[in-house]
Each structure stands twice: as C-alpha cells, then as structure tokens.
Amino acid sequence: MRKIALYVLFFVAIAFTGFGQYNTPQNGVWVFGHNAGLDFSSGTPVGISTSVYTIEGSASISDARNRLLFYTDGYNVWDSTNTMMPASTSGLGGFVTASTTQAGLIVPYIEDSTKYYVFSLENGYMSGSHGKLAVSTVDMTLRSGLGDVVSSTMGRLIRQGLSEKMTVVAGNNCDYWVITHHNDSPIFYSYRITAAGISDSPVVSVAGSHVDSNGYLIGTIKVSPDRTKLLCNVEYNGYNCEVYDFNPNTGVVSGAKILEAYGSFYSGEFSPDNSKLYLSDYVLSQLYQYDLTAGSWADVRASKYTVSYSFVYDMKLAKDNRLYLTTPGGTMLHTIDSPNLAGARCTFVDSSVSISSGTICGLSFPNLVYTVVGVDTIYRIHDTTLSLAIGDSITLNAGSTGNNYYWNNGSSTNSIRIGASGTYWCVIVSGCNVWVDTFHVDLHLGVIDLNDKSAINVPNAFTPESTTNRIFKILYNGEVKLNYFRVFDRWGNKVFESTDINACWDGHYNGKLMPQDAYIYQIQAVTCSGKVVSKTGNVTLLR
C-alpha cells in the first residue's frame, strides 16, 4: 500500500479553557420533562424515551463519543439503560427537587475520567429550612461500567437558603466554578472545584438590585459561551432580569445591569457568538432578542426586538448552533435557527422539532455540562482537494501524551488510518488537559501529527490561478512569530518575501506568473515557547 507524505498540523491545544461548551460531545444527549429526551449524536436531534419524570430541572451527560452515560433530576440517577442507579433509590440529598428550576448539575472530576459530581438543589417552596445544595459522586466503574452513586458520598450538604438557580462554568486554572444564588438577597456563591475537590469556602459576590423574601427564588442562571456574562432571571412576583459580568479566573460576579425591570422571565439564552441575548416573558407570551454589541447598556435595552409571540419557558443552545425552546406540556419544540443574526433573520420556527411519542416537555431543559476542552479549529489547506488513488491511506496520529483518545469513528487508540476524504475529530485527554479538534481531510498527503505544538509546515505543490490550491502558504499551529518567509527560483533570484505569518505567494513576480518549476523556500519562525523553527525545502509550481 502506497503512503503519501504530509507534514501538516491540524491541532491547536489549549489546556483547560472552555469556549462554546454547548457543542461538546458531553452535551450530545438531553434528558428532560416527562420521560423525554433528544439525541444529537447524528447531527440531527432525534426524540428518545427516558425514565426521568420531572416538572422542571434535570441534567444529563454523554461520553466523548456522544453516548449517554447517565442523567438525574437531582433526586434520583438513571444509567444509560434508563435503569435507576441502586444507591440513588432513596434520593440523593433527602429533599424534594421535582419542581426546582435547575434541580441537578453534573460536573466531571478533574484528573479522573470515571467519576462525576452530581449536585442536587432543593425546591424553594418547601416549608422550613429550604434551598439546600448537596453533592454526591457517581463512579462509572461500578456495576460493570453502568455506574452507581458512591454511598459514602451521598447527599453531602454544602449550603442552604439558596434560590432554585445553579450552573457551572469552566475556570481558567484547571478548575470549575459551580455558581448558586441566595434566595432573598443579591448574593452569588461560586464554589471552586479543582483536582483536590470542592472548596468549602465559596467566592461570595454581592451583585444585583433586588432584596425581598424569595426575591430570587425561581428562574435560571445562564452563562455566555465565552464565559464572561451571566443572565439571572428573577421570576417571582413579577420582578426583573439582570445581566452580570463573570470572571472565570476568580469566580467573581459583578457589574449587575437590569435588562428588564418588570415581567415574568423564567429563562433566557445567549447566542453562539455571544452577541445576542434571548429572553422570554411567558405570561405575555413574548420572546425577545437583545443586541449585546449595540453600544451602551441603554442601547442594548433599546435594541429589544420581539422575535415571536409564543408561550416559552426555557431555552437552550444545542450542538447544531440552534436555540431550542420548550412549552410545558407540549410535544413539539420551537427553534431559533440562526441565533447570531439580528431581528427576523434569527429565524424563529414554530413547532419545528418533535420529541418521542408518549413523552412530554416540562418547564426546563437539562443543565449544561461543562468540560474543559480546547478551541475547535478547522484547517482546509487553502481549500485544496487532491484525489487519493485507490490503495492510498493517511494516518492521523494524536501523539503519545494522552491517557485516553476518542475518535469520532469509535477508535480509542492514539492513531487511525483512513482511506477516504472526510471530517474527523479526536479528543485527547491527559490529566486535567483535554484537547479536541475537528478537521477536514481534503489533502491526501500522509501522516498528520496532532500533538506537535511547535512545527510549521507547507504544502509541496500549488497551482496558481486555478480554482483550488492556488497559493503557497505556511501552515502553522498556535501562536507563531515569523522572522522570514522567502522563495527563490532555481537561479537564486528572490521572487517572494514576507514577515507576516499569514502571507502567501500567488506564484507571481513583478506582476507576471512564474513558469512551472521547482522553487526553493526558506522559513524561520519563533513559537510561543520561544523555540526557533527553521525550514527549507522545495515547492513545485504547477500550471
């Protein structure tokens, strides 16, 4: 079998940072409402039946191959076969969660891919001491890989007197922040999770404008994909909706701004590009959009646009970059198909997605699962397509630094061999570092090293003035400073030079297309670690 050589980097590894978490495999299956669920693993949501039966909050998590692991309503936990985990039959925290807005939350352990924290939040309407937050641990090595709750960890009480709001955000320092809110006062509690466990002392932030008994009881906390903004809905006695700044380094919430001063706002959601915010007033049956890039906060409020007159409670951003909206008791979901776009261009579609027969929507969607992954990147090598002859192959090599490897074709080895063009991704897990990349293989030229973070490379041929592969350009990974990029003809005449890492040679010199021939290139660059990388070789100009 003939193998063609390729020296192209596809992988950008950024340790423990989280962006666009809604589209990770762990959020590939949603479980919610009365036995309802959606499976996004195929790229198109498919309704599934589950065992959960809740009025409001839930949480579910899948593995790196989009396969459902388990789910919870904050009281019980079910495995991937829809069977209740035995240790959870009597309830995780010993309190009611069936009507808690964000009743459950699942957070992966750091540096242990087999364990998960499951947070439970009590229904705020209960008499006496209420608003309890408790945590348990699910160990997926138990019950032959189906998992169970570790009995010794069951329902450890963390705090009480909380509202029904709870979410998690990936931090910048190999950590997570679990964020909760006081029931009566404008106080946020951010609990830091590291490899050592959950901090006993939260970061306390006083931010907001409302003080009243049960003033913050109902409604969700939502996080922008870039983790810099929070939306807090105050749905009790017709109060307001507030937007805050969030610091993923410190866990501090600040800069409260009132988005709406009065209304019934249960939930909202940010657009994938963080530019838009959506909010629903379910009493008025109105769905609003706000442009967060409009200018001053007064300009943001003035940008309010009524997307639809629809009865909507919760909304959630999915892997397909659409917003899904739920109507309690319904069997259909609405969608916003282009949430980054302003006004009517966001494209609200009424009753566009069916859930499984015999299942019913509740008030809420499942809480987001945050995992600490790198930035997703796609390199198409100048939109070049070269045909792969019969019998040729390409080896995608993810290196040897990971503890676990997850390819979208189901392989768990550090490399795969492919014989056809297509889209591939690999998740590489090493301790608290997780790398993930999605890429298209259109150039069929050999071994691709996903884990080499310092090399720079170039294609070995290009065809100027063609529809594809028409420029000669440096392919690089991460932050690179270019010292020089030079091209010479066979007689030593310099025909191109640049110090811009993104510059390219189009095959012309002094306004004229150069003849078909082999040309010599010289490259010297400095990586973000200070390593000087030099490369010299030949490139063929084809005509």
Image (spheres, rainbow, N blue to C red):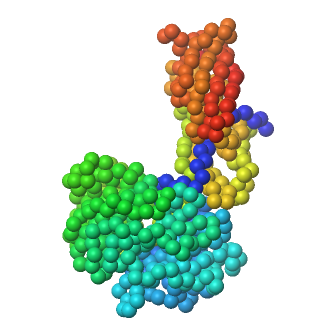
Picture mark count: 0
Residue 405 place in picture, x, y as percent: 68, 56
Residue found at the very far bottom of the displayed protein: 128
For this orientation, the residue located farthest to the right is 1
Q: Is residue 336 above or below residue 200?
A: above
- Left or right for 421, reference 74: right
Residue depicted at 57% across the width and 72% down the height: 198
Residue 327 percent coordinates (x, y): 33, 72
Quadrant the N terminus occupies: top right
**435 and 382: which is toward the camera:** 435
Corner quadrant of residue 113? bottom right
Residue 39 visible in the current orientation:
no
Seen from the viewer's position, the closer of residues 393 and 160 is 160
- Foreground residue, 507 or 215? 215
Tell me the residue at 35%/63% (across/down). Answer: 231
Residue 195 picture quarter: bottom right
**Residue plotted at (68% across, 42% down):** 452
In which quadrant will I find the C terminus? top right
- Give the answer, above or below, for where 400 lies relative to 69: above
The front one of 368 and 193 is: 193
Residue shown at 56% from the left, 68% from the top: 193
Relative vertical location of residue 430 with respect to residue 464 in this rendering, above or below: below
Horizontal side of 62 relative to 454 (left or right) equals left
**In the rendered image, the vertical position of residue 542 relative to residue 149, given as above or below:** above
- Residue 169 visible in this rendered orientation of the protein: yes
Which percent across, then down, holds residue 191?
Answer: 50, 70
Residue 279 point in image, percent of width and height: 29, 63
Residue 36 appears in which quarter of the rendering? bottom left
Q: Is residue 416 left or right of residue 163?
A: right
